[in-house]
Image (spheres, grey):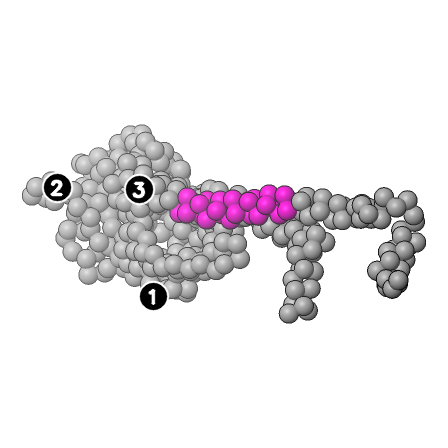
């Protein structure tokens, strides 16, 4: 029991308390700084991914673009978990009601992994809906496209993505389904042949403008307009022979970023424009708030530990100094003798025996 009491006394001694307090201050300061850096790292939590406008291969069976992820989390999409359907705008011949005519679908040819603050190239395979494109309805859509000079085209992508991140060194992953609508304007043009000696080929659905994307069709349609994408109808001429329309009809001539005055396709460049909905902004802000609350709790607890440890170190230091500077007992000091002599005298007095008379 005496030994255990001595050990407890040593553990609670002023020097031990000062050492323990100093250790708590150092470690808590490190955790506090780390939490502040983590909180700053996730502000903002979400920034739209920057992707170049997809470029078609020579035969049109593949699309290639590059994407950059500016966020602090990685995004992984399995090729079998992503599907894109492509549509061209059409109007019913009986009711004039607008609808989307399906002309094909596509999917990534490989798994897409966008590392945090990283970039990658994406290649997608394209499969045309040849059955639909051979119908009279599609022929009528192309005829209307020649007369108007352009037509909106859309893609709708549904994918399941795995999002992974780390907060304070803790790995966190979640799976979410994303919905993305994209729109652009297209029309007839001539594209270069497969080699220099080959004549230009006619394509009824060349890319005229940039692309704008949004999580909902409604939001995308607000921006996929000629005014926003830089297309304008500059005149009308008798329809040329390659349109298959009678020359008595006038076909519109347009000015757009990716065609010239001779209706020849120009190099496609630039990035996809992303327009978020209010719901998407709120969701991103909610995720940011979760990170902020978690790191703020860590910051607050660390600050409390630092303050408590600092106070305890000061109190322990004062106690240690009090022990160091405390003098001899009052009885010894009052004798006027040196401490050693007074101690010996005290021992002699205690050891003396009374003399019998």
Q: Which residue is mark 2?
A: 97
Q: Nearer the viewer, residue 325 or 78?
A: 325
Mark 3 crowdedness (10 Å alpha carbons): few <14, some 14-19, many ≥20: few
The residue lying at 34 percent from left, 66 percent from top is 80
CA gap, disc 2 and disc 1: 34 Å
Closer to the chain start, of discs 1 and 3, is: 1
Residue 299 lies left or right of residue 134; in this view the side is right
Q: Which residue is mark 3?
A: 279
Chief SS of the magenta region: helix
Which quadrant would the C terminus be assigned to in this image? bottom right
Q: Which residue is mark 1?
A: 80
- Element assignment for label 2: loop
The residue lying at 88 percent from left, 46 percent from top is 335
Q: Position of residue 172 (x, y in %)?
A: 44, 59
Q: Which residues are magenta?
A: 287-312
Q: Nearer the viewer, residue 263 or 256?
A: 256
Compared with 30, 255 (above or below) is above
The residue lying at 10 percent from left, 44 percent from top is 93
CA gap, disc 1 and disc 3: 27 Å
Label 2 or label 1, whichever lies nearer to me, is: 1
Based on the displayed image, in which of its 4 quarters is residue 228 positioned?
top left
């Amino acid at each position: 029991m005496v030994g255990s009491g001595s050990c407890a006394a040593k553990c609670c001694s002023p020097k031990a308390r000062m050492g323990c307090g100093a250790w708590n201050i150092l470690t808590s300061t490190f955790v506090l700084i780390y939490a502040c850096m983590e909180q700053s790292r996730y502000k903002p939590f979400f920034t739209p991914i920057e992707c170049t406008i997809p470029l078609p291969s020579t035969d049109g069976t593949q699309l290639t673009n590059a994407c950059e992820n500016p966020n602090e989390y990685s995004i992984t999409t399995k090729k079998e978990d992503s599907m894109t359907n492509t549509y061209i705008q059409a109007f019913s011949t009986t009711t004039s009601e607008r609808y989307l005519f399906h002309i094909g679908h596509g999917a990534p040819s490989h798994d897409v992994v966008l590392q945090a603050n990283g970039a990658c190239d994406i290649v997608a395979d394209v499969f045309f809906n040849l059955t639909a494109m051979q119908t009279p309805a599609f022929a009528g859509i192309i005829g209307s496209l020649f007369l108007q000079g352009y037509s909106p085209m859309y893609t709708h992508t549904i994918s399941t993505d795995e999002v992974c991140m780390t907060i304070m060194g803790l790995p966190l992953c979640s799976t979410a389904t994303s919905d993305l609508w994209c729109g652009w304007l297209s029309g007839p043009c001539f594209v270069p042949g497969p080699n220099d000696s080959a004549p230009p080929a006619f394509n009824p659905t060349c890319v005229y403008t940039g692309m704008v994307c949004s999580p909902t069709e409604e939001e995308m349609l607000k921006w996929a307009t000629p005014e926003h994408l830089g297309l304008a109808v500059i005149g009308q001429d008798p329809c040329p022979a390659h349109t298959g329309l009678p020359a008595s009809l006038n076909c519109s001539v347009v000015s757009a970023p990716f065609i010239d005055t001779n209706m020849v396709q120009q190099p496609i460049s630039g990035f996809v424009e992303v327009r978020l909905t209010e719901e998407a902004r709120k969701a991103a802000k909610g995720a940011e708030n979760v990170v902020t609350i978690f790191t703020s709790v860590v910051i607050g607890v660390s600050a409390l530990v630092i303050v408590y440890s600092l106070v305890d170190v000061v109190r322990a230091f004062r106690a240690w100094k009090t022990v160091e500077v405390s003098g001899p007992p009052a009885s010894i000091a009052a004798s006027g003798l040196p401490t050693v002599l007074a101690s010996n005298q005290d021992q002699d007095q205690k050891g003396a025996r009374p003399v019998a008379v």
